[in-house]
Image (tube, rainbow, N blue to C red):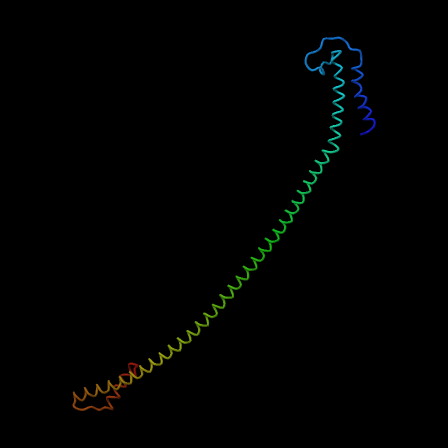
Amino acid sequence: MKPWLLLAVAMLAFAPCLALAAEPHLAEPVPGMPQLAFGHPEQGRFLIASIVWLFIIFGILYYVMATYALPGVAQVLETRRARIEGDLEQAQAAKQRADAALAEHEAATGRARAEAQAAVTTATQHAQAAAAEKAEALNARLGAQIEAAEQRIAASRDSAMAALRGVATDTAAALVAKLTGGADHAAIDQAVGAELAARGRA
């Protein structure tokens, strides 16, 4: 504490003593607190002592607060502020890491989706190509079978037509022989051939 402030405090402390040492005046006491009897010649002297002690106690309290209490409170506040700032920095760093992980996850998901789509497309194309090849092979086999069947049908038809001409010739010869008593097989065969030719079955 500064010297001039100590001197002022000391003078104020001794002032009530000097006031109390003065010659007393007889007067009626004021009921209540004597410190508030400002105009009373006896009790009014305590007002100066109260003010002096008020300043002394206030100065001591201010010194104690400024020296011991307030620095501790300031240190606690500074520590709390530093801890809060550290927590905020850690939270910000964690948020940035989470955002980076989320972006990486989304990119990996997009790549996996694209790869899966490409695989599905490739598999579909292969399946379509295999199906087309099987269809072509089946069509070729069916075509060969149809052609063979047509050839067999044509052969059967030719054989049937040949047999039909013989049957028709024999039948006509038998009828002519029965009706006329004789038959010319060569003429009958020629007539049957001409008839079948006219009908497109020769």
Quarter occupied by the C terminus: bottom left
Name the residue located 68 percent from the left edge and 12 percent from the top edge.
31
Residue at horizontal 80%, vertical 11%? 23
Name the quadrant containing residue 163.
bottom left
Check the picture and name the quadrant holding the N terminus. top right
- The image shows residue 116 at horizontal and vertical percentages of 53, 61
Q: Nearer the viewer, residue 99 or 121?
A: 99
Left or right position of 150 against 82: left
Horizontal side of 61 relative to 197 (left or right) equals: right
Image position, residue 160 (x, y; %): 29, 83
Horizontal and vertical percent position of residue 21? 80, 14
Give whichever of 170, 54 is nearer the camera.
54
Query: From what the image shows, is residue 166 above or below residue 20?
Result: below
Q: Residue at x 63, y 51 (%)?
A: 97
Question: Within the image, what quadrant is residue 197 found in?
Answer: bottom left
Tell me the residue at 43%/74% (across/down): 137
In the picture shown, does residue 21 fall above or below 134? above
Number of numbered tags placed on the structure image: 0
Residue 3 x/y as whole percent: 83, 28
Question: From the viewer's perspective, is 136 left or right of 4?
Answer: left
Please say if 96 is above or below 40: below
44 and 107: which is toward the camera: 44
